[in-house]
Image (cartoon, helix red, strand yellow):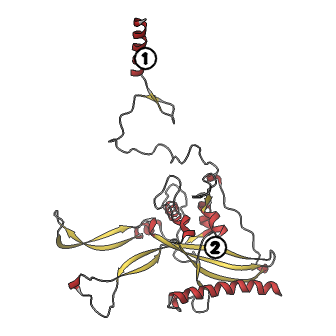
Amino acid sequence: MKKSGLIIVALFLAIFAKAQVIDSETGQTGATPPPQQNADVMDAIRKPVDGVYDKIHLAQFKPISLTYIREADVMWAQLIWRNLDLTEKLNHPLYYPTTPQGKWKSLMQALMDAVSDSSEAEPLRVYNTDRCTNPYSISGLLSSLGQTQITEVLDDDGYPTGEQKTVFIAFEPREVLRYEVYEQVLIDRQRSVQEMRMISFAPMVFYTSLATGSEEPQDEEYGMGSIEARKIRRIGWFYYPEARPLLATTEVFNPANNAQRRTYDDILLMRHFSSYVAGEENVHDNRKINEYVVNGMDQRLESDRILDQIRNRESELWEF
């Protein structure tokens, strides 16, 4: 009995020593892999794993066809500009995640990936105005996304050498905290509806610049340097009909049910976002509200007045 027990143990150890590892993805066998603590990061071998099953239906999504509008059926129309502040809670699905989490990415990250994707025959275009007539070149757009700053050169001990150098700080999608939307409001008598249709939208980033023209110089004795003023610039305008195929296949986090994630096209079509009117078309070169109203509270009241005027226009038309 003892000899037979020793023979069984010896056979078990021999089989275990010759055991091979089977790759669950490829099914190939190989030697036991070495520890991965200090291993170099290799190229990706598969797509990001976001669960135990693949969401193949998402890649097959297509934008929902919008209802055709006949010019003779439009009783009233107006062009407006809106601002979407991503710091508001309702707009957080458009901002997060700040870094891609598998296949889940922010709206700006998805747009930048589509713009810089060299595998596509025609990458997503970015235009210089909200009318979307003249597109930027891809190389020029990517090289301009950033901010140039002048910094002092430090020696090996961390002390300034008196020299200065120009540093280019690259743009990051997380810096986009606002979107400007250009859309048209119209009343269709054929369907008896008032509808808002987006035409184009532009991501906007804040940056700091040294304030100039101050009346009094800053007191350097108490360490008060130049005042930094926040300014905002548009990266470019995306034509909404061109971006819809991308938006319809990019999922958005759904806190209620991970199995039924929405897409960015769903959010924009359902208008599941918070915004305020930044301007309406007018005879004064389409000036925005902040060009003729200075106070912030008065600007918001002017925005509400424009919205009330649009709502009243619809009710007045159906009354007669």
Measured along the vertical axis of the image, is residue 39 above or below residue 14?
Answer: below
Q: Is residue 276 visible?
A: yes
Q: Residue furthest bottom?
A: 215
Mark in front: 1 vs 2: 1
- Residue 160 location in percent, x, y? 18, 71
Disc 2 marks a residue whose amino acid type is: Met
Residue at image location 60% in from the left, 63% down from the top: 264
Question: What secondary structure is marked by label 1?
Answer: helix
Measured along the vertical axis of the image, is residue 247 above or below residue 238?
Answer: above
- Residue 228 location in percent, x, y? 35, 81
Measured along the vertical axis of the image, is residue 24 above or below residue 275?
Answer: above
- Residue 146 location in percent, x, y? 39, 70
- The answer for how far apart the CA atoms under marks 1 and 2 are is 70 Å
Label at residue 12? 1
**Of 145 and 263, the residue lying toward us:** 263
Q: Quadrant of residue 197?
A: bottom right
Label at residue 244? none
Q: Mark 1: give few (<14), some (14-19) or many (20+) Cα within 10 Å.
A: few
Q: Is residue 55 left or right of residue 27?
A: right
Q: Quadrant of residue 6?
A: top left
Label at residue 198? 2
Residue at image location 64% in from the left, 63% down from the top: 266
Q: Is residue 30 left or right of residue 56?
A: left
Q: Mark 2: give few (<14), some (14-19) or many (20+) Cα within 10 Å.
A: some
- Residue 81 location in percent, x, y? 59, 80
Quadrant of the drawing holding the C terminus: bottom right
**Of 235 and 86, the residue lying toward us:** 86
Disc 1 marks a residue whose amino acid type is: Phe
**Sequence-first disc among 1 and 2:** 1
**Of 319 and 265, the residue lying toward us:** 319
Q: Is residue 236 visible?
A: no
